[in-house]
Every structure is written in structure tokens, then in C-alpha cells.
Image (cartoon, rainbow, N blue to C red):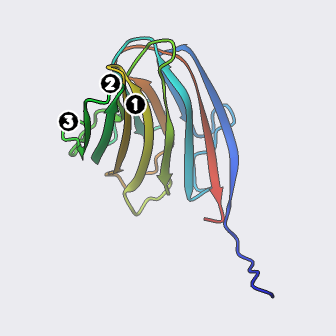
Amino acid sequence: DAGAFSVSLGSLVLIKTLTASSSSTLSFVNGSSDVVLDSTYPIYLFKFISMHPATNGGGFEFQTSTNSGSSYGVTVTTTAFESYHDEADSTTALAYSTSQDLAQSTSFQKLTAGVGNDNDQSASGTLMLFNPSSTTFVKHFISDFHEAYHADYATHSLYAGYFNTTSAIDAIQFKFANGNMDSGTIKLYGLKDS
């Protein structure tokens, strides 16, 4: 075959796009508004484009639901790692972030540090949720974000963990910790053949 190979690498299927406009929350609920968040796909990918807060310094965060979004507060244990560099080139760090992780908590999990609300500041990134419909295993996630931190830092945030439930997760909600989302876009994809 002259060095060529054929393999199924899977493909992303766009399920739903939500756009923030002074929104307090954005939620994806299986079976609502054409959202699929069930056993159709083993992996779900969320892409976040320029999430801009109304209030300065709030972290972007999320939680899940096992009751179609009636409540968000599934027990979660996570890990958090950040690197940053300020515009003045005077402060840098690469470290575990003990203030950003959760241990058997029902709180919302941060996906970013404090995002700035200057007109040119926002956060963008990805979140992968694995096998949310499983009734056997906990539900793992991995996120990778970059944000314009409110104190004029470039911050890279890496979070991962698991929702400690064997119930199917069928809804997920996103918000800023202290105010509305002025603007931004969230796209939900299913990864088939994965």
C-alpha cells in the first residue's frame, strides 16, 4: 500500500450550539431543544469560544445532573493545575492549584481561574466528558482552558476528575461564579466511533 494506511479515527458530530447574551447559565439537557447527552456517543466534547463575564474575576465553572436538570450537584472529586505569566513579564508559575480542586463535593467545579471582564478579555477551551450514560462506572472529565486573567495574566488551566455516581448524567450546566455571561459560544459535539 506504499505506506498508506486506513483507520477509523472517529468523527465529531455537532449536536448543539448555545450563545450567551447576559445569560446567568447555559445548560445542555438530554432530550431538550435537540440536545443529545446519552448513550448515543461514548465521548462528548464541549468547545468554549470567548466566554466573556459581566463581572470581573469570576471563574468559569460547571456541574452535572442525573435528573434532567432539576438540580445540579453531583458529587465530584477533581484535580487542578495552572500555569500563568503576567503582561509585565514579572510573575510566572507552574503549579498544582489547591484552591481550585474539589474532594467529594457537590459544588460547581471551576474550569478557569478568575476571568477578566475588560472588553478584550475572555476564556476559551475544551471539556471532554466520558461515557456519561454509564450505570456502572463513575463519569470522568478532562478540561483544558486558557483565560485572560483579571489581573492581566495569561493563564492556562488544566482540570480533571470524576463525578462519583453510577447514575447516568443527563444534563450539564455552565456559569461564571459571580455574575452573568455577557457573551460567548458553547458547542457540544458527540465523538462517534471512539
Residue 75 in sight from this viewpoint: no
Asked which secondary structure carries label 2, the reply is: loop
Q: Which mark is residue 99?
A: 3
* Structural distance between the alpha carbons of marks 2 and 1: 43 Å
Q: Are marks 3 and 2 in contact (CB under 8 Å)?
A: no
| Residue appearing at x 44%, y 39% in the figure | 145
Up-down relation of residue 9 to residue 107 (above or below)? below
- Mark found first going from the N terminus, 3 or 2: 2
Q: Quadrant of residue 16?
A: top right
Up-down relation of residue 165 to residue 88 (above or below)? below
Q: Quadrant of the N terminus?
A: bottom right
* Image x and y of residue 3, in percent: 75, 85
Asked which secondary structure carries label 3, the reply is: loop
- Mark found first going from the N terminus, 1 or 3: 1
Q: Residue furthest front?
A: 89
Residue 27 in sight from this viewpoint: yes
| Residue appearing at x 37%, y 57% in the figure | 138
**Which residue position holds label 2?**
88
Given this view, does label 2 or label 1 mark the residue nearer the observer? 2
Up-down relation of residue 19 to residue 8 (above or below)? above
Q: Quadrant of the C terminus?
A: bottom right
Between 47 and 130, the one lying in front of the other is: 47
Q: Which mark is residue 71?
A: 1
